[in-house]
């Protein structure tokens, strides 16, 4: 028995509902003036939907939580030569449906339309990026750079991919430079759906850049809220926004930090993103220890356990020595400083974070130095112009 297409499913739904249901769907879509115009598209498998946003609205209106599953189904039916297929690449990507994305990329790579071929080429590189570990990013970076594209949207997206790689490589100075270019160029994109999604991606990059590189929590929160307050962003983006919004309060508000981080955990759990959940739970544990709000005997994370010992007045020297290879060098120096009230260790920790262009995390040691009498003006000068 032949499987029904998404268009046929809509037609069956219209036939089974009360008179005027097609008009209702046309109104919900926001892009059809009448039910008859919508039905013309539904009855002709060769006709494209007016917009992916309109399609998403009516799929959600009719089938609710089944929307993602049905859009994956539609990606198997869509004509790879047409604009809808290109928009679906981004939809599948932001919803992290990489199996369906790879399948659509293959179809578009082999179709006759040259523009679709270009989209397939760039989004195949996104799939490759998702499978690449941090050590391999320096090999992927030139491979992305060598891709030749003529479509403006793809030129912007190519820069985003390059920026993602630099971010993973902790080359934050490059992240900052490229982010400014991307933010300007996204505004010039004419495809409304791609423009909206790339603006969300841009906000994601800017959250990170303003928090970690520029040490500007307020601006980072503004970008985070721009994603959180959107009606239709993918859960992955919202989870990311809540994560960095929570992190931005790490030094200033225990309640805001933990509240936002817990929202991020919930969203990542819904996506079965186990590694992200574990990472954020470790950060929440650290924040609880940092703010003296930890109410258990021991931490799951060894570095948090060492900080807890120090806060309890226990000499953690042996634990530090035995676990040195398990802890990032800059954070290890911070812990050494806390264990012995060493201004030298805190300064070294701060310098190492600065050398990584991670000015936000450099505040860990900077705040301890100020607490112990170091001149704040000198420390701000060490942080450089990026602080402001």
Image: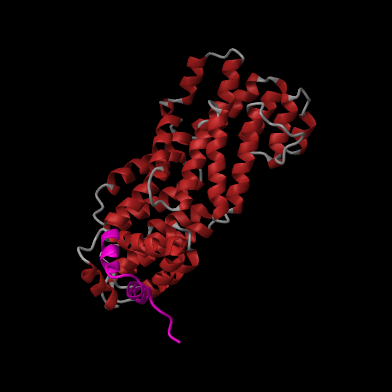
Q: Name the spot of residue 224 as percent of width and height, x first.
A: 42, 40
Residue 136 in which image quadrant: bottom right
Q: Residue at x 41, y 39 (%)?
A: 225
Q: Main secondary structure of the magenta part?
A: helix
Indicate whether 373 appears above or below 99.
Answer: above
Q: Is residue 7 magenta?
A: yes
Q: Position of residue 287 (x, y in %)?
A: 61, 32
Q: Is 153 or 22 nearer to us in this picture?
A: 22
Quadrant for the C terminus in the image: top left
Number of labels in the image equals 0
93 sits to left or right of 193: right
Is residue 31 found left or right of 253 in the rendered image? left
Q: Nearer the viewer, residue 358 or 70?
A: 70
Which residue shows up at 65% across the image and 37% down it? 285
State which region is magenta. 1-28
Q: Answer above or below: position of 291 versus 325.
A: above
Comparing 306 with 137, the one in front is 306
Residue that appears at 41% across and 66% down: 71
Residue 351 can be seen, yes or no? no
Q: Is residue 2 above or below residue 17?
A: below
Quarter occupied by residue 322: top right
Looking at the image, residue 306 sits to the left or right of residue 255; the answer is right
Q: Is residue 131 visible in this depiction of the protein?
A: yes
Q: Is residue 360 magenta?
A: no
Judged from this view, the residue extending furthest toward the front is 18
Residue 29 in the image, given as x and y percentages of width and height = 29, 60
């Amino acid at each position: 028995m032949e499987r029904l297409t998404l268009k046929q499913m809509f037609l069956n739904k219209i036939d089974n509902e009360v008179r005027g249901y097609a008009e209702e769907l046309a109104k919900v879509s926001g892009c059809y003036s009448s039910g008859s115009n919508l039905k013309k598209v539904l009855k002709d498998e060769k006709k494209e939907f007016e917009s992916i946003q309109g399609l998403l609205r009516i799929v959600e209106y009719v089938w609710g939580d089944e929307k993602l599953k049905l859009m994956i189904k539609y990606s198997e039916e869509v004509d790879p030569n047409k604009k809808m297929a290109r928009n679906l690449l981004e939809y599948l990507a932001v919803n992290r449906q990489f199996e369906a994305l790879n399948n659509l990329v293959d179809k578009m790579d082999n179709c006759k339309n040259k523009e679709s071929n270009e989209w397939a080429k760039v989004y195949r590189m996104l799939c490759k990026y998702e499978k690449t570990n941090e050590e391999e990013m320096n090999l992927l970076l030139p491979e992305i750079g060598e891709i030749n594209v003529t479509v403006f949207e793809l030129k912007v997206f190519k820069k985003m991919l390059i920026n993602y790689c630099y971010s993973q490589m902790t080359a934050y100075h490059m992240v900052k430079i490229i982010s400014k270019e991307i933010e300007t160029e996204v505004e010039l994109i004419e495809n409304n759906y791609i423009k909206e999604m790339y603006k969300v991606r841009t906000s994601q990059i800017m959250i990170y850049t303003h928090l970690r590189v520029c040490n500007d929590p307020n601006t980072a929160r503004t970008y985070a809220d721009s994603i959180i307050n959107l009606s239709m962003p993918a859960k992955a983006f919202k989870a990311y926004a809540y994560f960095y919004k929570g992190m931005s309060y790490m030094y200033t508000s225990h309640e805001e930090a933990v509240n936002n981080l817990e929202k991020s955990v919930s969203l990542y759990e819904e996506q079965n993103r186990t590694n992200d959940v574990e990472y954020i739970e470790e950060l929440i544990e650290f924040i609880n220890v940092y703010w003296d709000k930890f109410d258990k005997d021991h931490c799951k994370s060894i570095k948090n356990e060492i900080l807890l010992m120090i806060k309890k007045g226990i000499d953690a020297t042996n634990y530090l020595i035995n676990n040195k290879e398990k802890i990032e060098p800059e954070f290890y120096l911070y812990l050494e400083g806390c264990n012995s009230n060493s201004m030298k260790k805190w300064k070294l920790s701060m310098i190492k974070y600065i050398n990584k262009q991670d000015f936000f995390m450099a505040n860990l040691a900077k705040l301890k130095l100020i607490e112990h009498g170091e001149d704040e003006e000198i420390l701000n000068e060490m942080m450089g112009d990026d602080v402001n």
